[in-house]
Image (cartoon, rainbow, N blue to C red):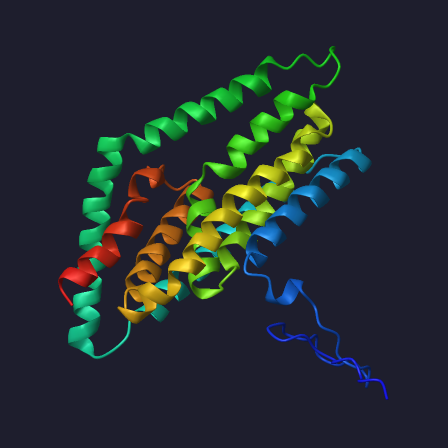
Amino acid sequence: METPLPRTIPGLRPLPSIRGCPALPVVLASAPVIGTIINVCAIVLGGLVGLLVAKTISPKIEYRLKLVLGILTIYVGMKTFLQALSGGFGSMTKQLVIVLAALVIGNLIGKLLRLQAGINKLGEYAKDLFQKHDPEKPKRFGEGFVTCTILFCVGPMAIVGALEDGLSGKVQTLAVKSVMDGLATMAFVKTFGIGPIFAAIPVLAYQGSITLAAEALKPLLGNHMLLDSISATGGLLILCISVVILDIQKVPLADYLPSLVVAPVLTWLFR
């Protein structure tokens, strides 16, 4: 007698039944890099839409999208920050002091390492590639690929979002980034052809590696109660990102990235 096949695979979350249909195991639903997968799909989809649709997004619609993305980023940042604070008043005050200290120290480290300056140079390089493109010449694959790879990988949202995905499974930050990257790809393919679509490959490798590394460290960080400090610091950084998205003020976000390492260290020292 044949042994019936299992309806689910251990370790995978099945898709809920719809109108009595049996649930099916879906690998994507349990993928540890789901946020990055969403980002990659958005880049590819945005590129394909840009190639197929002749019209570009009007400034009015672009402004409205930016406003929605900014508000959504504020919500994600506040929610992440507040959920990370736990315990009584004394415990929450201690966590807040540690997070603020981590931001100050992290910013000093970032300035010494010239992180923002380095990212600005990469951004200028990408901008030069775009401006040097001659519309009369054939669309160049390499320039579009390099330009979009730099733009999609060097921003703080890529690092903070990938870390969140690995440490807590939250994909909201990368979801916001996905919309931004998709819209950018839609515009860039009109200048560079299909090159920008292939920037999805380094995005997958870069963000996926960060997420998998964070997931591997999660047991260690969780055992020593260090995850909350990282989440709280990340939440404040996401709030700063919203300020940049809404064009309220320019913030050297990259210089604050070391805070994500400083925060758990301070939590460990003052536990």
* Left or right side of 219 for 226: left
The N terminus: image quadrant: bottom right
Instruction: Locate residue 63 relative to residue 90 in the image: left or right.
Output: right
Residue 231's place in the image compared with 62, above or below, is below
Residue 225 location (% of width, % of height)? 27, 69
Q: Residue 159, relative to residue 13: is it above or below? A: above
Q: Position of residue 121 (x, y in %)?
A: 41, 23
* Residue 262 seen from this side: yes
Q: Residue furthest front?
A: 1
Quadrant, the C terminus:
bottom left
Q: Residue furthest bottom?
A: 1
Q: Is residue 92 left or right of residue 166?
A: left
Tell me residue 141's x, y (percent): 69, 23
Vertical comparison of 270 with 113: above or below: below
Instruction: Tell me which residue sits at (58%, 58%) in the image.
Output: 34
Foreground residue among 62 and 72: 72
Q: Residue at x 22, y 39 (%)?
A: 109
Residue 80 found in image quarter? bottom left
Q: Residue at 62%, 28% (x, y): give it.
A: 145
